Image (cartoon, rainbow, N blue to C red):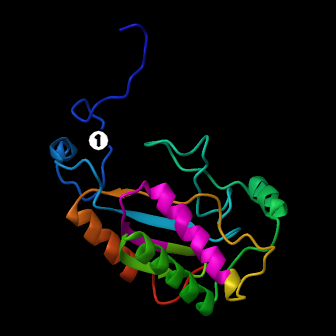
Amino acid sequence: MSGRVRSPTVREGNTRRHVSMTKPDYIDFQDRSEALGFLITFRTYGTWLHGEDRGSVHRRNYNRYGTPGMPPNKSLLEEETIALRHAPVVLNPKQRSTVEDAIREVCDERKYTLHAINARSNHVHSVVTAPRKPEFVLNSFKSYATRKLRESNLLNESIRPWARHGSTPHLWTEEDMEAAINYVLNGQGDEPFR
């Protein structure tokens, strides 16, 4: 080789896989070229900042497989808190219901299959099957939800309700789908957490 570094394959020890997979080579035998669905999660603006004790993901330095998460950092947290353009957004029950209705509308209009949805006070989870990239679906959910909140006079025009991007893991197996649906519907606790 010409000094190039390449990632190991699964057989060479790269066991990066979903926790539901029981065999190290499970991914090698997948017959599927498209995911069964996506677990789409997005947070409200300002409710989870870099440097917090609970950890966070940083696009440049702490988002690589197998590396430790971003450690707490009080000075970074203070900088991010000062940089907020407005107060953190915490959804009330009416806003949460409106967000869920907006996501259902996206799915109805675009013929996506919505398997589960749960809008919480500071984040939204959904499990959806769509013939699009999950990032496109995520952006559609955020756009429709923002529009519905504003049309219902539940969100001021000057408020940016969502944090940047979100999480969009692919769900490749029936087990992954079942686990994600169960998590969205039953794994959130009785009270919305902050």
Q: Is residue 115 left or right of residue 161?
A: left
The answer to whether 125 is drawn above or below residue 7 in the figure is: below
Main secondary structure found in the magenta portion: helix
The quarter of the rendered structure image containing the N terminus is: top left
Q: Is residue 38 left or right of residue 24?
A: right
Residue positioned 59% across, 91% down in the render: 93
Pinpoint residue 139: horizontal percent, then vertical percent. 56, 62
Q: Which residues are magenta?
A: 125-149
Most foreground residue, 2 or 97: 97
**Residue 145, magenta (yes or no):** yes
The quarter of the rendered structure image containing the C terminus is: bottom right
Pinpoint residue 17: horizontal percent, then vertical percent. 30, 48
Q: Quadrant of residue 73?
A: bottom right
Q: Which residue is mark 1?
A: 15
Most foreground residue, 140 or 176: 140
- Residue 187 visible from this viewpoint: no
